[in-house]
Image (spheres, rainbow, N blue to C red):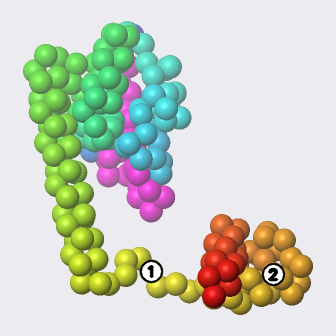
């Protein structure tokens, strides 16, 4: 008996799978145990390294169909998505993407998948290039990047020394990370050494 399996994924905690679930339910009848999800999981993480997808992969049997709302739910880059589809196909499982509207395991589906994933990759490269151009422009104007510094290095280092406190205790007292305490102490030490 063949089964329809659904896979949903969201990248961050603030996102919900409901829209993906709704889209799949409109077209397919998926039993409750046929749903697999990865929440707060980046598409950059290879599909088989995600808990939800790994469980789906173990569950899927020959003749089953895996349905996703869109190709990008499987992964971000062409190679990973193609490897994922190939791994499922080797088990005799077909993959259907609703948004793109085709069976990814068919020859036409694979060709379309390669093209769409390549376009998505190109768009990501363009976004990164625009970001880098923006950063270079800000640097050229002599502005500092990032959030303004809110930790008083000297106060942190002085409190730690006065109280003979550990890095962990200092971090707790100032409500900052241990790494921030180390940076503050190193900055004060370097400043003292240079003056």
Q: Is disc 1 surrounded by few (<14), some (14 to 19) or many (20+) residues within 10 Å?
A: few
Residue 5 magenta-highlighted: yes
Q: Residue at x 78, y 77 (%)?
A: 170
Q: Residue at x 42, y 13 (%)?
A: 61
Confirm or deny contact between disc 2 and disc 1 (CB under 8 A): no
Q: Is disc 2 surrounded by few (<14), some (14 to 19) or many (20+) residues within 10 Å?
A: some
Vertical placement of residue 12 versus 66, above or below: below
Measuring from the top left, give residue 142's x and y in whole percent. 29, 84
In-front residue for pair 134/161: 161
> Mark 2 or mark 1: which is in front?
2
Q: Residue at x 50, y 19 (%)?
A: 58
Mark 1 secondary-structure assignment: loop
Q: Look at the image and tell me whether residue 142 can be seen.
A: yes
Q: Look at the image and tell me whether residue 176 can be seen.
A: no
Measuring from the top left, give residue 119's x and y in whole percent. 13, 42
What span is in magenta?
3-22
Q: Quadrant of residue 118?
A: top left
**Residue labelled with disc 1:** 147
The quadrant in which the C terminus is found is bottom right
**Residue labelled with disc 2:** 160
* Earlier-in-chain disc, 2 versus 1: 1
The quadrant in which the N terminus is found is top left
Q: Quadrant of residue 29?
A: top left
- Please state if 94 lies on the left or on the right of 165 as rendered: left
- Please state if 46 lies on the left or on the right of 85 as rendered: right
């Amino acid at each position: 008996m063949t089964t329809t399996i659904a896979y949903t994924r969201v990248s961050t905690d603030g996102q919900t799978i409901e829209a993906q679930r709704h889209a799949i339910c409109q077209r397919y009848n998926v039993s409750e145990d046929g749903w697999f999800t990865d929440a707060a999981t980046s598409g950059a993480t290879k599909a088989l390294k995600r808990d939800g997808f790994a469980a789906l992969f173990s569950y899927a049997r020959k003749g089953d169909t895996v349905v996703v709302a869109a190709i990008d739910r499987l992964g971000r880059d062409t190679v990973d998505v193609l490897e994922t589809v190939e791994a499922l196909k080797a088990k005799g499982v077909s993959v259907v993407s609703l948004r793109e509207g085709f069976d990814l395991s068919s020859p036409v589906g694979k060709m379309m998948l390669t093209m769409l994933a390549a376009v998505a990759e190109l768009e990501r490269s363009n976004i990164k290039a625009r970001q880098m151009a923006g950063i270079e422009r800000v640097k050229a104007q002599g502005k500092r990047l990032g959030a303004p510094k809110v930790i008083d290095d000297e106060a942190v280092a002085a409190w730690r020394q006065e109280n003979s406190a550990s890095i962990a205790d200092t971090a707790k007292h100032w409500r900052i990370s241990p790494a921030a305490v180390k940076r503050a102490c190193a900055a004060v030490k370097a400043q003292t050494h240079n003056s």
